[in-house]
Image (cartoon, grey):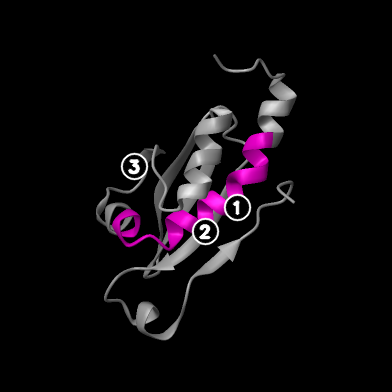
């Protein structure tokens, strides 16, 4: 049985792990392949993360996260947008060059911090 937590506490817990989720998923080859092959705007619930420790924490606290793929128009880049399922306003992003693009050969991942997520 899960411990009852206030909505405020649950939001804080999600915020605490959001950057780790972004990092773990952004560096995971299977997740990257899924996101790069997905249609623009596709949303995926994050049920499994590569890091066992992070996965255990997510399970322990009953946290639910999603990632959305979004093409950056006019570029060879795609944006991965991470957010808690119950708090979509707590968004954090990573921008990634499309596989095989000139940008991929010359640049590495860039992380974008959105205002209010510090």
Binning the other alpha carbons within 10 Å of mark 2 as few (below 14), some (14 to 19) or many (20 upward) gives: few
Name the one closer to the observer, 79 or 55: 55
Q: Identify the secondary structure beneath mark 3.
A: loop
Q: Along the horizontal axis of the image, is 54 left or right of 67?
A: right
Main SS, magenta region, reads: helix
Q: Identify the secondary structure beneath mark 1.
A: helix
* Residue 30: quarter of image: bottom left
Could you tell me if residue 63 is visible in this image? no
| Spot occupied by residue 67 in the image (x, y as percentages of width and height) | 44, 44
Q: Identify the secondary structure beneath mark 2.
A: helix
Cβ atoms under marks 1 and 2 closer than 8 Å: yes
Q: What is the quadrant of the N terminus in the image?
A: top right
Residue 42: mark in rendering: 3
Give the CA separation, mark 1 to mark 2: 6 Å
Residue 19: mark in rendering: 1
Residue segment shown in magenta: 13-32
Name the one closer to the observer, 86 or 28: 28
Q: Is residue 111 above or below residue 93?
A: below
| Spot occupied by residue 77 in the image (x, y as percentages of width and height) | 40, 66
**In this view, the mark in front (3 or 1):** 1
**In this view, the mark in front (2 or 3):** 2
For mark 2, what is the residue? 23
């Amino acid at each position: 049985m899960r411990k009852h937590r206030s909505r405020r506490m649950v939001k804080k817990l999600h915020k605490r792990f959001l950057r780790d989720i972004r990092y773990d998923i952004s560096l995971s080859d299977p997740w990257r392949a899924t996101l790069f092959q997905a249609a623009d705007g596709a949303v995926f619930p994050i049920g499994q993360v590569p890091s066992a420790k992070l996965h255990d924490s997510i399970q322990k606290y009953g946290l639910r996260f999603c990632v959305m793929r979004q093409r950056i128009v006019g570029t060879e880049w795609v944006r991965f947008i991470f957010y808690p399922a119950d708090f979509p306003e707590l968004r954090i992003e990573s921008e990634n060059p499309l596989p095989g693009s000139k940008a991929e050969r010359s640049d590495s991942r860039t992380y974008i911090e959105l205002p209010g997520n510090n």
